[in-house]
Image (tube, rainbow, N blue to C red):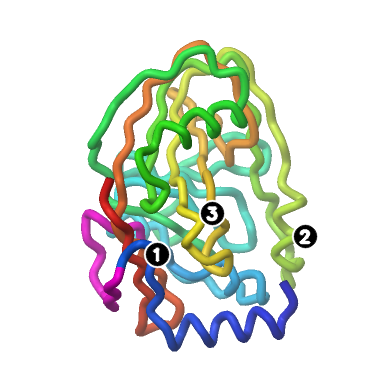
């Protein structure tokens, strides 16, 4: 995405409140609710080279108990799980960051389990996504997903810290380090975004991160294989995106 296009997109986001297809009302909100995913900035903001940190670890976990993000200077990936924030460093190892640590981008919500089911014989992340998408009664709502089990193998990517000035966003994320682990127990957390959410906010589809049960390994999910997984998910009606210091864009979904 070139700079001109990004600027035009951000201008549109600052002027319009957009709605997910299928809903005929829109609202602007300033308060996170239990039916909303909160995102600190549209992805286009970072793609335009705006690397000013938008939120601290302390603030991140004060507005949700479930989510993910990218640390300042691309210094690893943030994982928010059960109200605790973890930092998956470029070597795939997980540490607990200080409350004052800053994030470039973060997405989170207050997660409550609405449905639970079991999936067996998952040969790949691609097969997982295909099976789960076909399970949905509608593709008009965002889903929050928590997936637990033992992974025969799992491959993740972890952002690598950049020296200032940081490289353009697409280049910086391509420098992420990949790691594969065998026979590891852990949890996937994240979201499935409806195609009605604009690419400038976040690409549609699955966005999942992994953290091991012993909280020592983690990163963004690239692929995995498992014999059995327990899935918990919640339908999300709204997505609230902060695009200026004092305004948000609000996307409404439709129920199952």
228 or 108: nearer the viewer: 228
Marks 3 and 2 in Cβ contact (< 8 Å): no
In the image, taking residue 74 as reference, residue 249 lies left or right, namely left
| The quadrant where residue 38 appears | bottom left
Of callouts 3 and 2, the N-terminal one:
2
- CB-based contact (under 8 Å), mark 3 and mark 1: no
Q: Earlier in the sequence, mark 1 or mark 2?
A: 1
Marker disc for residue 177: none
Mark 2 = which residue? 171
> Would residue 226 appear left or right of 135 to someone viewing this image?
right
Q: Foreground: 188 or 166?
A: 188
Tell me the residue at 41%/48% (across/down). 67
Quadrant (top left, top right, bottom left, bottom right) of the C terminus: top left
Q: Is residue 102 visible?
A: no
- Within-10-Å neighbours for mark 1: few <14, some 14–19, many 20+: many
**Residue 112 x/y as whole percent:** 23, 41
Position of 24 relative to 211 (above/below): below
Task: Read off the residue under disc 1.
Answer: 20
Check disc 3: other Cα within 10 Å, few if <14, some if 14-19, many if 20+. some
Instruction: Specify whether 204 is left or right of 26.
Output: right
Q: Which mark is residue 204?
A: 3
Describe the element under mark 2 as helix, strand or loop. Answer: helix
* Residue located 37% across and 18% down the image: 118
Q: Position of residue 89 (x, y in %)?
A: 61, 43
Q: Which quadrant, please, contains the N terminus?
A: bottom right
Which residue is depicted at the point 62% across and 54% down? 75
Image spot of residue 111 (x, y percent): 28, 44
Over which residues does the magenta segment extend?
Answer: 24-38
């Amino acid at each position: 995405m070139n700079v001109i296009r990004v600027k035009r997109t951000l201008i549109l986001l600052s002027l319009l409140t957009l709605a997910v297809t299928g809903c005929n009302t829109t609202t602007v909100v300033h308060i996170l609710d239990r039916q909303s995913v909160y995102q600190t900035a549209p992805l286009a903001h970072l793609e335009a080279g705006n690397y000013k940190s938008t939120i601290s670890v302390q603030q991140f976990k004060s507005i949700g108990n479930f989510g993910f993000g990218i640390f300042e200077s691309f210094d690893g990936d943030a994982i928010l799980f059960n109200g605790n924030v973890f930092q998956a460093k470029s070597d795939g190892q997980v540490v607990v960051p200080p409350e004052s640590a800053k994030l470039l981008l973060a997405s989170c919500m207050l997660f409550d389990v609405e449905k639970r089911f079991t999936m067996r014989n998952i040969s790949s992340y691609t097969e997982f996504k295909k099976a789960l998408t076909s399970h949905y009664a509608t593709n008009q709502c965002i889903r929050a997903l928590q997936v637990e089990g033992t992974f025969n193998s799992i491959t993740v990517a972890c952002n690598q810290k950049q020296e200032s000035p940081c490289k353009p966003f697409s280049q910086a994320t391509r420098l992420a380090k990949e790691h594969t682990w065998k026979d590891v127990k852990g949890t996937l957390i994240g979201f499935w975004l409806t195609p009605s959410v604009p690419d400038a906010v976040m690409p549609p589809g699955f966005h999942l991160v992994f953290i091991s049960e012993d909280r020592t390994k983690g990163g963004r999910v690239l692929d995995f294989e498992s014999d059995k997984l327990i899935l918990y998910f919640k339908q999300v009606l709204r997505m609230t995106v902060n695009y200026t210091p004092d305004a948000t864009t609000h996307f409404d979904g439709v129920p199952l």
